[in-house]
Image: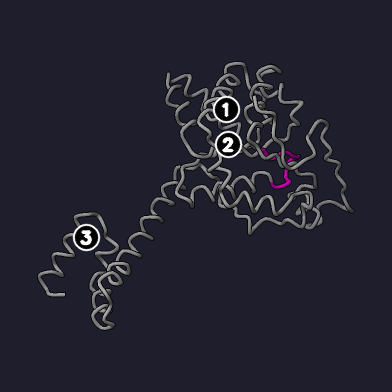
Amino acid sequence: MSANYEQLAADGLEQIGAPTARGQLDQIAQQAAAAGWSYSHFLGRLLEPELAARRQRVIDICLSFSGLPWKKRLSDFDFSFQPSIDRTLIEELATGRFMTEGRNIIFQGPPGVGKTHLAIALGLVCSEAGQRLLFLTALDLVRRMKLAFAQNRMPHFLKMLTTPKLLIVDEVGYLGLDTQQASLLFQVICVRYEKQLSTIITSNKAFADWGQVFAGDPIMASAALDRLLHRATVINIKGDSYRLREKRLAGLFPGAIALDHTQKGVIPTTKLRSPRR
């Protein structure tokens, strides 16, 4: 291209906010001239790195606001240690279709069996698709609730919980909620259900014990579960703790340790759908 048009192209790319294409313009233009590319070929090669850079910026923004404590991928998960998990089902969830369909996922099981790892791995799927997500532990949820109440910012906090494409609430059941906190969590579940936004919950509690989570209110717990389970995949993990295994391998525990993690009332299937209302 002529010097005048080359400068015009460079200025134009800068004005429309395409810095990656602007930086590679000279190199790609020389390649196009040497190889005799068509105009469409040249334009495609020029825009390809720009679009890739923009996608990466979106992913980076999603990750920066996600609250994910670390990056854990399915490729890092040891399925051989937890044979109760249907690997095919997990890989299907990792396609991200559950978010398109507005389905929820509930991981149940004792501490240390990989519930949080799997939840984070699916959260990364969400962010890498350029979708907003938010990860909170139940403890952090309670802490931020109290702060929002104290600062008169509850509407803003509620919006923050009901806007992301995916909400992950980790370790539900380790800490009971008071009546006000349980009511807010119920509102969040209701709003996300109506908007058909996906929620992932990890819990050590059987569904029969969720009344303890919702301030001892079995009616509220039942109503919350009705909405969570209407469009849901429930994955019940039965097995030993990864953390205890590491301690055994380090020789901290003499002999083998057999742990019975059977939970009364935990639904023993990997998929569950409650009747439509």
Is 39 displayed left or right of 163 in the figure? left
Q: Which residue is mark 2?
A: 199
Q: Which numbered tag is attached to residue 48?
A: none
Q: Disc 3 versus disc 2: distance between alpha carbons?
A: 40 Å
| Circles 2 and 1 in contact, beta carbons < 8 Å | yes
Q: Disc 2 versus disc 1: distance between alpha carbons?
A: 8 Å
Secondary-structure class at tag 3: helix
Question: Which amino acid is tagged 3?
Answer: Leu
Q: Residues within 10 Å of mark 3 (few under 14, many from 20)?
A: some
Find the residue positioned furthest to the front: 276
Q: Which numbered tag is attached to residue 189?
A: 1
Is 225 displayed left or right of 187 in the figure? right
Q: Which residue is mark 3?
A: 13
Place of residue 10 in the rendered image (x, y in percent of width and height, measured from the top left): 18, 64
Q: Which residue is pictured at 26% across the width and 81% down the height?
A: 36
Find the residue positioned furthest to the bottom: 34
Q: Which residue is pictured at 16% across the width and 61% down the height?
A: 11
Q: Nearer the viewer, residue 52 or 120?
A: 52
Q: Nearer the viewer, residue 208 or 67?
A: 208
The question of residue 107 being in magenta is answered with: yes
The quarter in which the C terminus is drawn is: top right
Q: Disc 1 versus disc 3: distance between alpha carbons?
A: 45 Å
**Upstream in the sequence, badge 3 or badge 2?**
3
Place of residue 71 in the rendered image (x, y in percent of width and height, measured from the top left): 56, 52
> Range of the magenta residues?
106-114
